[in-house]
């Protein structure tokens, strides 16, 4: 069964066994907003051992915190015992918990009112903290005293902004004031947790608004100073009538629609090399900003513990985003190699967003898209005409020169100048001739005494 069906069956089973049980948290929020929940969580007065007795296929995921993972063949649901938390020493987890029988106690330890709602099996909502009113008023509000909530779990600073951006809500003034006053606490959170929240802000919707709130809160400069440096960096108005590098980047974020994480990071970081390369000659220039952008991108994403695969793709997006201006003038071999880059659709979409966020000229985008559709895959990626073994058989010594030779052969093939292995080998003989025999070989030795 799917996660919703599993969650509802868990509630029914717990009720039948004499326990309270409710849907809780984000799934209730999303149901009331008419959205499809991604995760389904259950809260109950049943203790963890009792939950595991009732659901043999379960396992503890938070033994000290009363969280049990109930599974079937395809889905899983977290089932948590009502609890209140002890002190937080590390800005992430309480030092211990007290199991409770009153759902009100469980709700009061949670982060925001809109996440503090419970729903029973009949669809009746339990609201102890004003969450329904805040949903109606489109407000993110901390439960209880905001400063205490953020000092308990520092990641809530970012989560407040993510919820507001994703749902297009406002953050309640006292809650946002507490975020501003405590923004530096985010630096105590692990890089992996920060990365995950930033990626969600970038990909779940409302990325522009999310980054504007990050900036207003002080966390943008804490977490991504290289991005904060974009503010106020002017651009030549003939190419960028929209304004400075920060405004341009925000416009790209605004244009994102269900992006992959790599495309979203590419949109955020494609011009990150502009602030350190800004100079004014006859006009504003950013010489070397692509290379600097690749260097900074590698540093930022490594700092956030992104995967090597993710870093490589974002570096490629940043490193190639200016090449579209040359599409009209590329040789066939250069164009085909460009179009066959891994995940080229992301490069294409980044360029489209880049154009729409500046001068609006999509001519190069349309040409690249047209070429991608027109050129069949067998011409973009034709089989090799020669291999290293062929070169060895011809008498060439293995070494760095092999790469140069094979690239030259491939370029000629992509340009249409050769089409067979025989033509390829003739090109090699003409362009990379084998070294001539040394003068004074054995046959010309003077006779011995």
Image (cartoon, grey):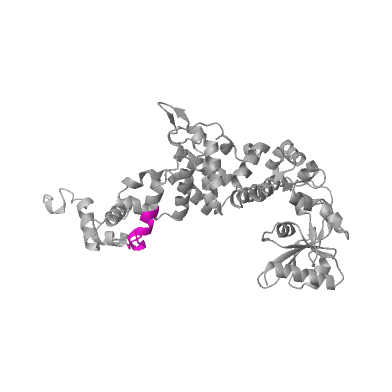
Image-quadrant location for residue 34: bottom right
Taking the spot 53% from the left edge, 41% from the top edge, the residue there is 249
Query: Can residue 98 be spotted in the picture?
Result: no
Image-based side of 363 in relation to 390, left or right: right
Where residue 437 sits in the image (x, y, percent)? 18, 51
Q: Position of residue 408 (x, y in %)?
A: 28, 52
Magenta run includes residue 377: yes
Q: Left or right of 11: which side holds 378?
A: left
Instruction: Using the image as rendered, state which of residue 138 and residue 163 is in the foreground.
Output: 138
Residue at the far front in the pictured view: 136
Q: Quadrant of the N terminus?
A: bottom right
Q: Main secondary structure of the magenta part?
A: helix
Judging depth in this view, the residue of 437 and 444 nearest the camera is 437
Asked whether residue 199 appears in the rendered view, the answer is yes
- Name above or below for residue 36 compared with residue 282: below
Tell me the quarter of the picture where residue 427 sits: bottom left
Q: How many numbered dots are placed on residues in this image?
A: 0
Residue 299 position within the rendered picture, expressed as x and y whole percent measured from the top left: 54, 42
The answer to if 235 sits in the magenta stretch is no
Locate residue 378: give its quadrant: bottom left
- Identify the residue at horizontal 79%, vertical 41% (top origin): 147
With respect to residue 91, does 42 lie above or below? Answer: below
Query: In this rendering, is residue 360 above or below 115?
Result: above
Residues 114 and 182: in front is 114
Seen from the viewer's position, the closer of residues 346 and 30 is 30
What segment is highlighted magenta in the picture?
369-383
Name the residue located 32 percent from the left edge and 60 percent from the top edge. 379
Q: Position of residue 392 (x, y in %)?
A: 28, 60
196 above or below 146? Answer: below
Relative horizontal placement of residue 117, taking residue 220 as reference (left or right): right
């Amino acid at each position: 069964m799917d996660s919703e069906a599993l969650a509802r069956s868990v509630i029914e089973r717990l009720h039948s066994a004499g326990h309270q049980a409710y849907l809780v948290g984000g799934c209730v929020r999303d149901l009331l907003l008419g959205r499809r929940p991604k995760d389904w969580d259950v809260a109950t007065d049943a203790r963890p051992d009792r939950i595991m007795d009732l659901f043999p296929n379960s396992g503890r995921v938070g033994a000290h915190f009363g969280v049990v993972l109930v599974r079937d063949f395809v889905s899983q649901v977290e089932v948590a015992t009502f609890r209140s938390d002890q002190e937080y020493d590390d800005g992430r987890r309480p030092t211990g918990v007290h199991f409770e029988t009153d759902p009100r106690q469980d709700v009061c330890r949670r982060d925001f009112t809109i996440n503090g709602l419970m729903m029973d099996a009949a669809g009746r909502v339990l609201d102890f903290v004003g969450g329904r009113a805040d949903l109606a008023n489109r407000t993110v509000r901390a439960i209880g005293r905001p400063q205490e909530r953020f000092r308990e779990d520092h990641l809530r600073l970012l989560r407040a902004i993510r919820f507001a951006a994703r749902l297009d809500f406002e953050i309640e003034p006292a809650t946002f004031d507490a975020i501003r006053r405590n923004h530096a606490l985010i630096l105590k959170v692990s890089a992996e947790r920060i990365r995950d929240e930033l990626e969600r802000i970038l990909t779940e919707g409302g990325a522009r608004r999310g980054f504007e709130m990050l900036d207003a809160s002080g966390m943008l400069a804490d977490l991504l100073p290289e991005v904060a440096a974009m503010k106020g960096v002017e651009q030549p108005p003939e190419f960028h009538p929209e304004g400075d590098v920060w405004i341009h980047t925000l416009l790209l974020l605004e244009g994102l629609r269900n992006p992959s994480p790599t495309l979203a990071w590419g949109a955020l970081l494609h011009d990150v090399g502009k602030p350190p390369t800004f100079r004014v000659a006859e006009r504003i220039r950013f010489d070397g900003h692509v290379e600097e952008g690749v260097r900074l991108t590698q540093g930022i994403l490594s700092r956030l513990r992104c995967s090597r695969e993710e870093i490589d793709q974002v570096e490629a997006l940043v490193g190639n985003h200016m090449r579209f201006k040359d599409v009209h003038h590329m040789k066939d071999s250069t164009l085909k190699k460009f179009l066959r880059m891994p995940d080229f659709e992301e490069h294409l979409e980044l360029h489209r967003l880049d154009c729409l966020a500046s001068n609006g000229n999509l001519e190069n985008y349309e040409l690249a898209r047209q070429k991608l559709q027109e050129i069949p895959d067998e011409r973009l990626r034709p089989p090799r005409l020669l291999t290293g073994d062929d070169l060895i058989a011809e008498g060439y010594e293995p070494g760095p020169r092999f790469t140069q030779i094979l690239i030259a052969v491939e370029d000629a093939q992509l340009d249409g100048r050769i089409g067979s292995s025989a033509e390829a080998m003739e090109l090699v003989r003409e362009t990379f001739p084998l070294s001539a025999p040394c003068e004074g070989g054995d046959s010309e030795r003077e006779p011995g005494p």
